[in-house]
Amino acid sequence: MTELADGTRGRRRLWWYLLAIAAIPLALFVTLLIPNAAGPHADSHVFSAAQYGVQALIVVGLAVMLRGALGRLSLATLVLPMAGVLFGAFASTRIAHLIWNKDWDNENAGDLGASLPGFEHWHELAERADTAIMAGGIAFALTVLLSRHAGKAAPVVAIMLSLIPAWIFPALGCSFLLAHVAARRALYPQPRSH
């Protein structure tokens, strides 16, 4: 294949990666359009579950597309944050189900929810999922840093982004680092050995 064809394919692949990343704010915007149907606190959990789900799709999609560009150990370290993301989505959904149609806001939900069986339990499990996402994101970035698949700066930035609490933006460090590797791979394709 010619150099020009490789470059064109690389740019086309880059646009697909950027489109995948652009899906994050679009999906979050759509979930914000959900009317306050379930009550303010339940709505925030519905939003969190949607956010977790979108982030899981993006990270897993990018990881599948990059499976040849990253080592097996790097991809294996994505299991912990992705398990946390999926479990966080499940826990948020369970909490929303418990308090559906209750007009609780975020300030009084803790006091009122303590009387509901499972309310505290699912909140604690959601917090543990958030911790797994943060620890897993840091482990993934360190693995990529040590394997030298993405230079030095991008994994360091990914570590800092992984410190952002998952309830604000889950697995942001993972998606940033995968998008960086994807863009790097698309812009600077490796010559194929015959």
Image (cartoon, grey):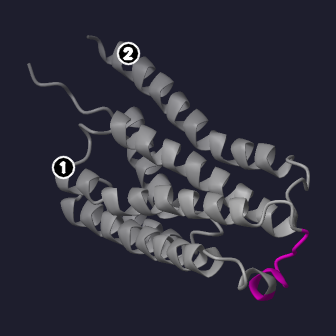
> Which sits earlier in the primary sequence, circle 1 or circle 2?
2
Nearest to viewer (mark 1 / mark 2):
1
Q: Is residue 108 magenta?
A: yes
Residue marked by disc 1: 72
Magenta-drawn segment: 103-111
Three-letter code for the amino acid on which mark 1 is drawn: Arg
| The C terminus, quarter of image | top left
The answer to which quarter of the image holds residue 61 is top left
Task: Between residue 61 and residue 2, name the one nearer to us.
Answer: 61
| Residue 60, quarter of picture | top left
Q: Residue at x 32, y 63 (%)?
A: 140
Return the x and y of residue 7 as percentages of the image width and height: 40, 22
Q: Main secondary structure of the magenta part?
A: loop
Badge 2: few (under 14), some or many (20 or more) residues near its Cα, within 10 Å? few
Task: Label 1, secondary structure: give it.
Answer: helix
Residue 102, relative to residue 25: is it above or below? below
Which residue appears farthest toward the bottom when viewing the image? 111
Q: Residue 94 at what x, y percent from top left?
A: 62, 61
How many other residues sit within 10 Å of disc 1, few (<14), some (14-19) or many (≥20)?
Answer: few
Q: Is residue 89 left or right of residue 194?
A: right
Q: Residue at x 38, y 65 (%)?
A: 155
